[in-house]
Amino acid sequence: MMPLYLLIPLALLIPAAFLFGWWTARRAGVRRSGAKVSELSSDYFRGLNYLLNEEQDKAIEVFLKLAEYNRDTVETHLALGNLFRRRGEVDRAIRLHQHLVSRPGLSDAMKTVALLELGEDYMRAGLLDRAEALFADLVAMDAHAPSALRHLIAIYQHERDWHKAIEHARRLEAMTGEDESTVVAQFYCELAEQARHHGAVVEARDYLEQAFACQPDCIRAYLLTGRLLADDGRHAEAVDIYEKAVGTDVSFVPEILPPLLNSYARSGQMERAERFLRELLGRYHGISPVLALTRLYQQRDGERGAIDFLTSQLRQRPSVRGLMALIDATMDKIEGEVRENFLILRDLTRKLLEGQAMYRCNRCGFGAKAHHWQCPTCKSWDTIRSIHGVANE
């Protein structure tokens, strides 16, 4: 799926086409008859209409025709390059933008615009080394530096070069005044994940301190801190961290509960677990704490107590996942035709759940079965949350 930062919004193409139409009509008015001006104006508005209706093939034909009237028209070539890239004809876009960059007499301002477009062509084509070099040059020239820095950060994220991503995010923050702390905190968490994977615990803790310095309420940093404590056998301390994470942002309950319940059990704090889950029912309306309490009661009190609790909760918060748990808990107590019907019902509910997205990005709407810290579609960080509904959380 195409990353959104590589898509050129239609709103950016329309002003370019408008400027071209005005400029061409003005030049034509000096050089040519009124009939030729009328022809150009008609073609311009026809091309603009095609753009508005997302008919890119027809728009390209019109703009190619307009470009023939005056081959020095930079705006037309930029609009054409954008259209080529949107159509997936990246080779044509690259050739067009390279031609613009090499054109003698092109103003510095227009040349940097063409370089920026060429860098986006390279990114779309997967030529990240060329794109990186080009954007780095633009930053060094202080030409379109914020846009170039954003593209460089995207490249370093793709290459998982988190140190460079942090460095350039800081430069962008200093240049624009925009707060990049939330994104930088995620970069430090990525570094902490890598260090933990390689057994570099001290290094991982240092990265997490940096993440908390950037974003004191970073849930991902809380989760990683809890995992480091659990890895070290310090489950009682991990429980404190996980509970604090829930208090910071209750929407992450589905991600926090599994390691939290494990640390409760490993530290022998199941009574504390029951109290916490009971309290959580009052402020979190998803099914995860209900299912956790059901398993706890099943282990402690047996099937009957667990079934009674789950049944009462499902009346208050209907859930397909809860129904699945109820069917599974009841299967051992029924037989014959009723059991066969329950098996059919269990298969149907399982298939229903298999087709459901459990998480959604609140920026682009991407749906996923599992949680991601970075949206795979729009590349935004910390925008994916669990979906609440009968067939979801």
Image (cartoon, rainbow, N blue to C red):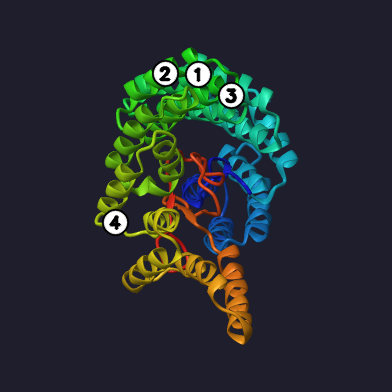
Instruction: Identify the mark nearer the N-term, 2 or 3.
Output: 2
Q: Are marks 2 and 3 in contact (CB under 8 Å)?
A: no
The C terminus: image quadrant: bottom left
User: Label 3 crowding class (10 Å Cα cut-off): few <14, some 14-19, many 20+?
Assistant: few
Mark 4 residue element: helix
Cα distance between the residues tagged 2 and 3: 29 Å
Residue 361 visible in the snapshot: yes
Q: Nearer the viewer, mark 1 or mark 4?
A: 4
Instruction: Identify the mark nearer the N-term, 1 or 3.
Output: 1
Give the labeled residue for mark 1.
Answer: 139
The image shows residue 343, relative to residue 88, as above or below, that is below
Mark 2 residue element: helix
Instruction: Identify the mark nearer the N-term, 1 or 4.
Output: 1
Q: Are marks 4 and 2 in contact (CB under 8 Å)?
A: no
Q: Nearer the viewer, mark 1 or mark 3?
A: 3
Q: Nearer the viewer, mark 3 or mark 4?
A: 4
